[in-house]
Image (cartoon, grey):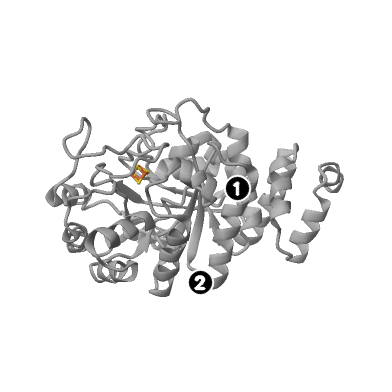
Amino acid sequence: MHSRLADANLLDIADKLDAGVRLTLEDGCRLFECPDLLAVGWLANREREKRHGPQTYFNFNIRLEATNVCVASCLFCAFARLKPGDAGAYTMSLEQVWDKLRQRRTQPLTEIHVVNGLHPELPFDYYTEMLRGFKRIRPDVRLKCFTAVEIAFFADLYGMTDEQVLHELIAAGLDSLPGGGAEIFAERVRRKIANDKCGSDRYLEIHRIAHRLGLKTNITMLYGHIETAEERVDHMLRARALQDETAGFQAFIPLAFHPDNNQMRKLPAPSAADTLRVHAVSRLMLDNIPHVKAFWIATGVEVAQTALWFGVDDLDGTVQEEKIYHMAGARTPEALTTREIERLILAAGRQPVERDTFYNPVVHEAAASLKSRSA
Ligand code: SF4
């Protein structure tokens, strides 16, 4: 591999990684420009295996989008409808929301992941009651709900500080924040594609507060539209800087832009090669974030599987009923069973580990008693 890294002009970066020296903005840009994708992937895989060996995490979760009514108009979004009553707009009642969980009362779920549009008319207790209801139905299930963009919107709409909103939601049962809404932190891009939602500094500040209040969270990056390689690396470096302060991020999740049914439909979707590279460079730049996740709904199942050799150690979860990507043209299934995810991971030569929201391995009682009987 030495000569291949030398040919790819990556030996100095390999040496830095060996010595535990951090990669710079310039290093990150070189990794994006390097023609030898497999050499970049090899380096990322080495970092992945240093941290996790062959282990590949997934969880048994459901996604729920309670409303797609949203006052914002992000150019890449095919999910949102501006007003209640617009064609395709929906807002679920709390009973309908809770029914989604009641229907799965007997499934060994460990997490509910909720993200919504920014609805201008719902009261704050719609959200706090939603969490309380979930906990009544399934106290064992972790609630990873509301992006930092939603937290900022709640604070502005209901006249609270970001911290007060988080306090109230935690009191109602919130366990973690998902990473959505980060898009790209570079102001040039954010102004163009997501002008009317909270800015980068506030997104990061909300995660900073959440970490201080004891929540573990995730962070995303929407790639493959109008951003440059330098803006991608800048995004990663801003995540890395906050992680140095708080250590509260669990996973970095690159999200592939999907061009159907939105205002950026003239752009092509990112290629498989670009997707593999983005995940690999994320693993290399983010030396302090434990996990890099491939969201299979967005990347496609086959690319997510290949990404397990390009720095990725987490395949998200069973998901079930995802709407946001499917409305933007994702042709992936809407759900995978845990058995299917395990098979995908094993077929890629990796070792599946079912995890909970906080990356604790999950041992189902039935499997555990089977093992102890056969021991
Ligand atoms: S991405 Fe989120 S904030 Fe932006 S329009 Fe869609 S639902 Fe609204």
Classify residue 316 as left or right of residue 159. right
Q: Which mark is residue 246?
A: 2
Q: Which mark is residue 231?
A: 1
Q: Position of residue 335 (x, y in %)?
A: 36, 39
Q: State whether label 1 is within 8 Å of ligand 1.
A: no
Label 1 neighbourhood size at 10 Å, few (<14), some (14-19), many (20+)? Answer: many
User: Which quadrant would residue 39 be assigned to in this image?
Assistant: top right
Secondary element under disc 2, as helix, strand or loop, is helix
Q: Position of residue 131 (x, y in %)?
A: 22, 61
Are the residues tagged 1 and 2 within 8 Å (C-beta)? no
* 131 vs 100, nearest the viewer: 131
**At label 1, which amino acid type do we have?**
Glu
**At label 2, which amino acid type do we have?**
Thr
Classify residue 243 as left or right of residue 95. right
Q: Earlier in the sequence, mark 1 or mark 2?
A: 1
1 vs 2, front mark: 1
Residue drawn at x 27%, y 51% is 107
Residue drawn at x 77%, y 54% is 13
User: Which quadrant would residue 203 be assigned to in this image?
Assistant: bottom left
Residue 265 lies, with reference to residue 298, above or below; the image says above
Q: Quadrant of ligand 1?
A: top left
Residue 157 lies, with reference to residue 3, above or below; the image says below
* 179 vs 80, nearest the viewer: 80
Label 2 neighbourhood size at 10 Å, few (<14), some (14-19), many (20+)? Answer: some
- Distance between mark 1 and mark 2 Cα atoms: 23 Å
User: Which quadrant would residue 326 be assigned to in this image?
Assistant: top left
Q: State whether label 2 is within 8 Å of ligand 1.
A: no
In the rendered view of the protein, which quadrant contains the C terminus?
A: bottom left
* 230 vs 283, nearest the viewer: 230
Q: Position of residue 106 (x, y in %)?
A: 22, 52
